[in-house]
Image (cartoon, rainbow, N blue to C red):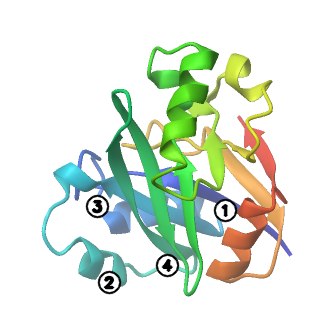
Amino acid sequence: MILRGCLHSHSSFSDGKLTPQEMADAYESLGYDFIAVTDHDYLLKADYRSALNNVKTRMILFYGLELTVFVKGYVHVNRIEGNNEVLHIFNHIGEYGLSVNQVRARLDDLIKLYPIDAVEITSKGFRESVFDDIDWGYPRIASDDSHDNINIGRAWIEMDSDRDKDSIIRAVKNGNFWNCYI
C-alpha cells in the first residue's frame, strides 16, 4: 500500500498557528495517510499529548517532539513515537548556516546522544540540494516543517508500507521511501 506522510509539523501547542485538529484536517484534505506532530520541547504547552489523542482523523497521527540539543551550538532532532519503535531525525540541516563539514561534526556529536535514523534535507519544505546530494550515512528525508496552512504540503515522503506506525518507522529507518516535492 502506498502511503503519503509528513514527519515534521508544528501545532498551536508550540509555535504553530493551527490546532492539532486543524492541522490534521489540512493534511487529510491533501490525501495524506500519516503525520507526526513534533512541537518544540521548550515551547510545549500543557496537555499536548491529550490534545493529540483527541484529534479525529482517518490518518495515522504520530506523537513527537522536536528536541533542542546543544552540540557545538544547537540543533533540532525530532523524536517520533510508534507503538514499539522510535524514530530520531536530525532536522533541517540547511537552516543552521553551517558548512557541510560543520554539519558532519555536529552529526558526529549528535549520534553520541541519540540514535539518529534519518537526516532532513529540506528547509520549510524546500529541497536543500547542497545537503541532499551528500551521502550522510542515513536516509535523507523531505518534510515541510509546517507551522501554518502556507507550509502544508510542500514536501513529503511516500512509501510502500503496511498502514501502522511501526511499519512506517521501519521503512524510514531502512530508507524505503521516496522524497516528494510540489
Q: Which residue is mark 2?
A: 54
Crowd rating for badge 1 (residues with CA inside 10 Å; few <14, some 14–19, many 20+): few
Which callout, 3 or 2, points at the residue further toward the start of the chain? 3
Q: What numbered label is drawn on residue 19?
A: 3
Q: Residue at x 22, y 59 (%)?
A: 13
| Residue 25 shows in this picture | no
- Tag 1 near tag 3, CB within 8 Å: no
Q: What distance separates the C-alpha of mark 3 from that of mark 2?
A: 11 Å
From the image, state whether disc 1 or disc 2 is nearer to you: 2
> Looking at the picture, how far across and down is residue 152, in whole percent?
51, 45
Q: How many marks?
A: 4
Q: Which residue is mark 4?
A: 57
Q: Residue at x 24, y 45 (%)?
A: 15
Which callout, 1 or 2, points at the residue further toward the start of the chain? 1
Q: What distance separates the C-alpha of mark 1 from that of mark 4?
A: 12 Å
Q: Where 126 falls versus 44 (above or below)? A: above
Query: Horizontally, is 76 left or right of 158 in the view?
Result: left
- Judging depth in this view, the residue of 53 and 148 nearest the camera is 53
Which callout, 1 or 4, points at the residue further toward the start of the chain? 1
> Looking at the picture, how far across and down is residue 11, in whole percent?
31, 55
Q: Which residue is mark 1?
A: 31
- Judging depth in this view, the residue of 158 and 97 nearest the camera is 97
- Tag 3 near tag 4, CB within 8 Å: no
> Looking at the picture, how far across and down is residue 129, in whole percent?
73, 20
Give the amino acid at mark 4: Thr
Query: Horizontally, is 64 left or right of 89 in the view?
Result: left
> Looking at the picture, how far across and down is residue 55, in whole percent?
37, 78
Q: What distance separates the C-alpha of mark 1 from that of mark 3?
A: 19 Å
Give the amino acid at mark 2: Asn
Q: What distance separates the C-alpha of mark 1 from that of mark 2?
A: 20 Å
